[in-house]
Amino acid sequence: MKQYMNENFKHFLHGGDYSPEQWINTPEVWDEDMRLMKLANCNEMSVGIFSWAKLEPAEGVYDFSFLDTILDKIYAAGGRVFLATPSGARPHWMADAHPEVLRVNERGERMHFGVRHNHCYTSPYYREKVAQINGKLSERYGSHPAVIGWHISNEYGGRCYCPLCQEAFRGWLKKKYDNNIDKLNFQWWTTFWSHTYNSFDQVEAPSPIGDTFSGLELDWKRFISDQTADFLRAEAAAVRKYSDLPVTTNFMFHYTGLNYNVLAKEIDFISWDSYPEWHHPGELSDAEMAAKHALTHDAFRALKKKPFFLMESAPSHVNWHDVNKLKRPGVHRLASLQAVAHGSDSVQYFQWRKSRGSNEKFHGAVVDHLGNENTRVFREVSALGQTLKDIEEVLGTVPNPRVALIMDVENKWALDLAQGFQKNEKKYSTTCQQFYNWFWRHAIDIDVIDAHRDLGGYDLVVAPMLYMTPRETIEILEKYVREGGTLIGGYMLGMVNENDLCYLGGFPGEELKEVFGVWNEEIDTLYPTERNAIQCNKCGDEFAVADYCERIHPAEGTEVMAVYRDDFYAGEPAVVKNRYGKGTTYYLATRDIGGEESFKARLLARVCGELGIKSNLASYTEGVTAHSRIDDENGIRYLFVENYTPKDAEVDMGVEAIDVETRERVSGKFTLPAYSVRIFRQMM
Ligand code: GLA
Ligand code: ZN
């Protein structure tokens, strides 16, 4: 079934962050913005994100006049608004009169007034002021016809170590450990180095001038997520008081300071800000860059399994990369429709109009300092807006992948904290990305999920380096395989519980040994440039491996697929396959390297073949991929075929289809120009 963010406005949103308050003394600019908004085929503006100092110029003195005017103007011009709550940046007077709103760093120093995104999430005064202004905005605009949703704050993140936050942390711990300090001491293993706490009052947040160890660090990170989610809940409650419009907050690319699974529960729809670094020679190819952002699209979509929103992207370039290069012609359309291909129901920008001064005046925008429509960027934006109108039938549909990749943020925290292996860089994200890239290259739709999600509905699940397996995760994995699922895991699997206490009795912990039919006796960590190899038992081919080689013992009946070639464990098993219940598992005891030539690539191709998991394309071309969105009610599959290379590509979809934009009927085979995308309708 199609799912809409707002039933009263069933259109792709095209627009972005708009700061009319910066032009309050030149209202003719506002009128020009309205003219340009229509010309740019835009229908949405995100307003009020950093407007607090204008809306409440002095404590308790409110002035909504500019918002009144601008919302009416936008509506009159056919646009709609995501109305923001202004908590992302507070007014000066507030910090001066109430320093408790200012953050304290991990060394205990209170920050001065400045920049943004730096408030204390605990301060009762800040929470009260936020609730007041949110309530007023909601009361005044909650049923304004222009407003279609709430944009809560902006890019929540960071931590505060003030006394209020420290006290809240202790309260959080008391709740988690049933007010029993012995329970905490056990889970944090504080007998080590005589760190035993006598009472909760002694607990302090981790600090470079205080204590740091994984149990404490992990709970502190969880507390930060919970406290931020609690702040978000309070913000959302204040706007929901007078309004039943849907609520979101904008998430960030690869931001691991928060567990977004926790925040997602507080909002009605997911949105995020995507700024790929295109055309970066020597770094990633454009295709690799696309795959990196594709993974994040798939992770954010999978949070709610419904369309998400691309809340910000750069119409041309940003100002905060080391080198702020222009997107090559066509790339704007391609990158924007990439988001749509993965399930976004919007293309929104930071920013509508370039500021005249201060930090972001050289950040790309739809409207440049020139001030009119006569720019390449404006024309590309406008053309994209037309495309979004032309493909409106895709709105509300969602991909429905049969494959999932488990990439779990708490697992990343724990691995990063683990003192051992390659101490400073375990390469968890890179490893997940490498598995993901295989599916991306082969145009297979995939969800990216955390380790607490029910896996029913997936035919194949890949869980690399899943070091932290809380009891719940062990049960989820066990049940999934027992009931017939196929699960790929490997080195470092199931070593610790949620508090980083090692499982006793051999790794992987508890039932996972039976599920994978393997016991991991020890891990050989290689120096970064060292290599070993594994040899396939069936075909005899060899594949390079690096970083980690576990010495594993297969259980009886477990099939050995490959063995190590070198070192004192040459000939010992390196990859095994096991049957458990109705399902199958594969355990890769070592990190194989290389793209299409790797052992992993062969294994994934074989497993997908056996499970009938098919590519969206009938032919493979480097840098070309395809993603689908499903309209199950009408039996339609929308296929986005994407070329991220500077060369034209020969593509084969295997079936005839209709180009949604041009209505042209195309046979399966066609030439896809460099840096371009086409969208097709296929009957399922
Ligand atoms: C973030 C912020 C925006 C803006 C952009 C610039 O995403 O949310 O306010 O600063 O970055 O790229
Ligand atoms: Zn604080």
Image (cartoon, rainbow, N blue to C red):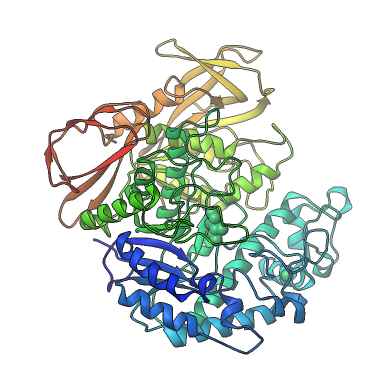
Q: Does any portion of residue 279 appear in the rendered image?
A: yes
Q: Tell me where residue 244 appears, x and y as whole percent.
A: 39, 80
Give the quarter of the figure containing the N terminus. Answer: bottom left
Residue in front for this viewpoint, 297 or 13? 13
Q: Tell me where residue 385 appears, x and y as whole percent.
A: 30, 56
Q: In this view, does 668 lie to the left or right of 464?
A: left
Q: Which quadrant holds residue 682?
A: top left
Residue at screen point 28% across, 70% down? 9
Q: Which quadrant holds residue 303?
A: bottom left
Q: Tell me where residue 523 appears, x and y as whole percent.
A: 66, 28
Residue at screen point 29% across, 40% down? 677
Q: Tell me where residue 103 appears, x and y as whole percent.
A: 73, 67
Residue in front for this viewpoint, 629 or 560? 629
Ligand 2 is found in which quarter of the picture? bottom right
Residue at screen point 83% across, 70% down? 201
Residue 314 to residue 612: above or below: below
Give the quarter of the figure containing the C terminus. Answer: top left
Residue that lies at the very extreme toward the bottom in this rendered image: 60
Q: Is residue 392 left or right of residue 518?
A: left
Residue at screen point 52% across, 29% down? 281
